[in-house]
Image: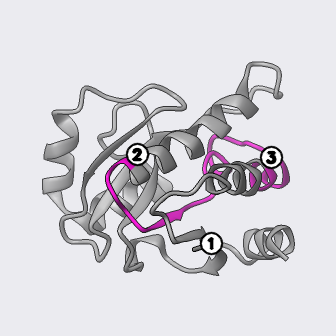
Amino acid sequence: MKATLQALHADITTLDVDAIVNAANTSLLGGGGVDGAIHRAAGEELTRECMGLDGCETGQAKMTQGYRLKARHVIHTVGPVWHGGTHGEPELLRACYENSLRLAAKNGLKSIAFPCISTGVYRFPPDQAAQIAVQTVREFLAVPSLIERVIFCCFGRDDLTRYQTLLA
């Protein structure tokens, strides 16, 4: 069965999926933006579990329970900070998506939702980030896995339009 890819304008903390992806910082202990929103919605149990994970390197991914979220799991990935694109940022962003999907597939998850990784305070250009996200997910799903549904969860209307255009 071919996986479905869709773009939604929504609050990622409200989605009923097997896993939501958290655009985390290296400490995994919460922060601003989507990271802070996920930690607040999941509750202090999430932060406690993250304390035992010993952080996460940029481009890597680690999984926790979802606690008070509708999502059963949270996959934490650390996106790159944009420094002009000459410091491996595109490759690191691609690794965020690949490693998150690999972790989901390894754990038998069927549905996953991604935020727009690195496009907020990390300043990755949104058009380039969306192209990397969609291309990486499509390439990963070209090899059969249990993943049936991938959502690109957009907080803003501009991001939604960007993803809808790429998915059309």
Amino acid under disc 3: Pro
Count of picture labels:
3
Mark 2, other Cα within 10 Å: few <14 / some 14–19 / many ≥20? some
Residue 119 is one of the magenta-drawn residues? yes
- First along the sequence among labels 3 and 1: 1
Q: Is mark 2 on a helix, strand or loop?
A: helix
Name the image quarter holding residue 154. Answer: bottom right
Give whichever of 35, 6 is nearer the camera: 6
Tag in front: 1 or 2:
1
Label drawn at residue 103 = 2
Q: Name the residue under label 3.
A: 125
Precedes in sequence: disc 3 or disc 2: 2
Asked whether, in this view, residue 6 is left or right of residue 166, the answer is left
Q: Label 1, on which residue?
A: 2
Q: How far apart are marks 1 and 2 (CA)?
A: 19 Å
Q: Which element is circle 3 on?
A: loop
Of residues 110 and 22, the one nearer the viewer is 110
Disc 2 marks which amino acid?
A: Leu
The kind of secondary structure element at disc 1 is loop
- What is the x, y in percent for residue 139? 71, 50
Magenta segment: 106-131
Q: How crowded is mark 1: few (under 14 residues within 10 Å), some or many (20 or more)?
A: few
Residue found 15% across the figure and 56% down from its top: 44
Q: How far apart are marks 3 and 1 (CA)?
A: 30 Å
Give the color scheme: rainbow, by chain, secondary structure or one colour. one colour
Whole-angstrom CA distance, mark 3 to mark 2, is 26 Å
In what quadrant of the picture does the C terminus appear?
A: bottom right
Position of 102 with respect to 1 (left or right) is left
Query: x and y percent of residue 35 in the render?
Result: 42, 53
